[in-house]
Amino acid sequence: MDQGNNGLSRGDRNRNARLAALRVVLPRDYAILGIDLAQSRQAAVLADHDSRVIARWRPRCSPWKLGELLDRARRKALAAGFSGITVACEPTGHRWMVIAQLAAERGIPMVCVQPLVVARGREAEDYTRGKSDDRDAVLIARLAAQLHCYLPEQAGQGWARLRHLGARRSRLIDSSTMCIQQLRDLLEVAWPAVLPAAAKPLESATWLACLWVTLERGDGDLGAVHAMGRDGFTAAARGGLGAWGARRICQRIAAAAYAALADPAGVAAQRPGALERAFSVLGDWRTIRGELAGVNARMLQALEAMGVLEVAGSIPGVSALQVAAILAETGDPSRFPTARAIVKHAGLAPCENSSGNHAGQAGISRRGRPALRLAAWRAVWGALRHNPVYAARHASLTGRAEDQLTDQQARAAIAAALLRQIHAIITRRIPWDAGIAAGRRRHGQEVNAAA
């Protein structure tokens, strides 16, 4: 706590600054237009800062047709003695972006209220949990007047493109994982002998090429493929390596896959149908892998176009693509006033549980964007193997005598540190520095390494 500044903590100062920024767009002489957005029927209410309703509207139209409502609400507010209006809504799908554009075209400020805050406000309103669009519109206006809201992201074209690419990449990764699990399950039933042909079969291009040849030419009959002979089988697999991202075949894996063709293990009645289905899954997976490679390349191009590719790839053990996946979830880091705000946005900030003399077990908040938390979590696994600073930090957190953390807790702490450091290198356009990351030196200032 900074006692030289009226005892205000850093959190107090950050919160005061945030409330001041919100008060700029929600001045007390402005009425608030709360809108509960839907696809074709909207609920809107114009209220003052005491939640007194001035006017209501129930337009039957898409969000794109609400420009007339904004004009009408502003005229109504001016007639009631207000200086203008501020629009407030929930971030419902893409519809809030439509309202944001319509409001910006008219010079009307806009804020968003989290749906969770609206749900809690609904319970506090009358304890019945009753829900209707008209009630929610009033709640949205009331919560905005109480500054329980936030300024929505104003993404430029580059950051918006990166966010869409990141969403597409996430879906492709989920689909790829699903294909891998299905493929393994089907082979364990119909042809288990082929799985030990490689140490990590689903990561081996040779093994995948051999499996493709078998499923494509055998039509469920492994004996017909075995009749090709080992040389013919290997040659056919070699011809398909390019589709799996390799040029040279591994003779040992190809020989083991060919030998597995003669193994009768498996559920005989299920084999033809399961192998046919496995071939379809393998084809889907190959297509997904190609699409994923294209999305990955475009994400790196987006970072390069924004001039941050070099610094994004400067963290040892964390690839530029992993940083791109994180930035796709955060958006432009400069919109966050502090690095800790990104950590809170990911739900990785410590969640205290104490009262009086009681100190309960603390954990992470798990609020915010789960996809951002997942992207940071994935990046930590590779970073711990190849980044000495993170490895030393993990060893320190899990090996200290007091307040020792578990492996999972230490990884969460390092994920939070990674997000803070990404905020620094992207906003300042400076490469990652091991000395700064380890706390031995500050940016632009030397500090005592033993401190």
Image: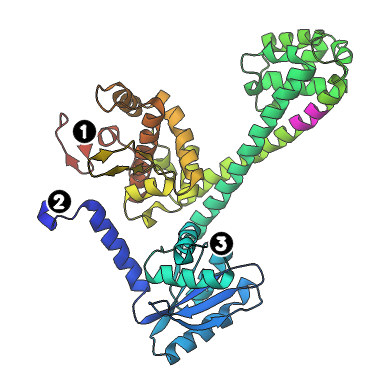
Find residue 310 and name its label.
none
Q: Nearer the viewer, mark 1 or mark 3?
A: 3
Position above or below: 32 against 8 = below
- Please give left or right for residue 105 compared with residue 287 in the image: left
* Residue that label 3 marks: 92
N-terminal of the pair, mark 3 or mark 2, is 2
- In this view, which residue lies farthest toward the bottom? 79
Look at 57% across and 41% down and name the residue there. 297
Look at 46% across and 47% down and name the residue there. 327
> CA gap, disc 1 to disc 3?
45 Å
Magenta span of residues = 277-282
254 and 400: which one is in front?
A: 400
- In this view, which residue lies farthest toward the left? 4
The kind of secondary structure element at disc 1 is loop
Local crowd size for mark 2, using a 10 Å CA cut-off: few (<14), some (14–19), many (≥20): few
Query: Mark 1 belongs to which amino acid?
Result: Arg
Q: Taking the image as drawn, is residue 238 in sight?
A: no
N-terminal of the pair, mark 1 or mark 2, is 2
Find residue 440 and name its label.
1
Residue 400, quarter of the rendered image: top left
